C-alpha cells in the first residue's frame, strides 16, 4: 500500500508540473463534478468546440440567404464539451480566463442544441 501511495504522489506531482487543472462543475440541480483538464489539451478542446459550434450557428438575420450547417462532428472532447455545456458554473484553483470562455461557448452550444431539438420536435408534431 505504501508503494502505491508514493507512486500516486509522484504522478500527481508530474501532472501538476505539466499543468493539469482541477475544475469543479456545478449543475442546475446543485450537483457537482470534478474534472481534470491538462493545460496542453486546452487548445484541442477549443478547436473541437469551434468545430461543433459550426453545426449550430446562431439564427441568420432576416432576409439573409441561409446555407445549411455542416453535420455535427464527433470529437475526442465530446464528453467534456457536454459537461461544460450542462454546467451552470465552473470553479478552478486559479482563475482560468480561457477556460471560462470555453465554458460560455459550451453553454451557448448546449442552448442551441436544445433549441434545435425543440424545433425538430415541434416540426415533427405538425
Image: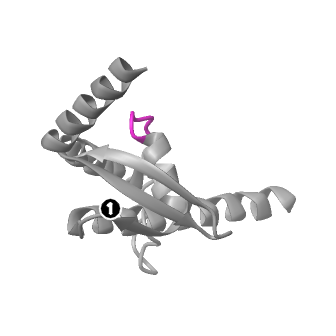
Residue pictured at 29% horizontal, 23% vertical = 7
Crowd class of label 1 (few under 14; some 14 to 19; many from 20; radius 10 Å): some
14 or 68, which lies in front?
14
> Is 90 rendered above or below residue 75?
below
Q: Quadrant of residue 76?
A: top left
Residue 18 position in % (x across, y down):
15, 40
Residue pictured at 36% horizontal, 28% vertical = 5
> Is 25 rendered above or below residue 88?
above
Query: In the image, is 103 to the left or to the right of 41?
Result: right
120 or 22, which lies in front?
22
Query: In the image, is 70 to the left or to the right of 97?
Result: right
Residue lying furthest left in this view? 17
Query: In the image, is 43 to the left or to the right of 36?
Result: left
Q: Secondary structure at mark 1?
A: helix
Residue under label 1? 102
Q: Main secondary structure of the magenta part?
A: loop
Q: Which residues are magenta?
A: 73-77
Query: In the image, is 74 to the left or to the right of 125?
Result: left
> Is 121 rendered above or below residue 19?
below
Residue lying furthest front in this view? 2
Residue 47 position in % (x across, y down):
26, 47
67 or 14, which lies in front?
14
Residue 8 position in % (x across, y down):
32, 29
Quadrant location of the N terminus in the rendered image: top left
Residue pictured at 24% horizontal, 48% vertical = 42
Quadrant location of the C terminus in the rendered image: bottom right
Whether residue 117 is visible, yes or no, is yes
Q: Quadrant of residue 105?
A: bottom left
Residue 117 position in % (x across, y down):
67, 58
Q: Is residue 14 magenta?
A: no
Whether residue 48 is visible, yes or no, is no
Amino acid at each position: 500500500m505504501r508503494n502505491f501511495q508514493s507512486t500516486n504522489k509522484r504522478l500527481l506531482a508530474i501532472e501538476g508540473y505539466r499543468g493539469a487543472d482541477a475544475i469543479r462543475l456545478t449543475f442546475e440541480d446543485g450537483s457537482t463534478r470534478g474534472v481534470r483538464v491538462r493545460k496542453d489539451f486546452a487548445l484541442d478542446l477549443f478547436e473541437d468546440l469551434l468545430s461543433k459550434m459550426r453545426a449550430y450557428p446562431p439564427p441568420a438575420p432576416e432576409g439573409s440567404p441561409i446555407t445549411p450547417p455542416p453535420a455535427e462532428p464527433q470529437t475526442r472532447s465530446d464528453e467534456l464539451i457536454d459537461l461544460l455545456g450542462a454546467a451552470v458554473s465552473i470553479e478552478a484553483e486559479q482563475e482560468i480566463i480561457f477556460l471560462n470562455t470555453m465554458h460560455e461557448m459550451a453553454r451557448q452550444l448546449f442552448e442551441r442544441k436544445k433549441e434545435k431539438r425543440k424545433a425538430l420536435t415541434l416540426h415533427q408534431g405538425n
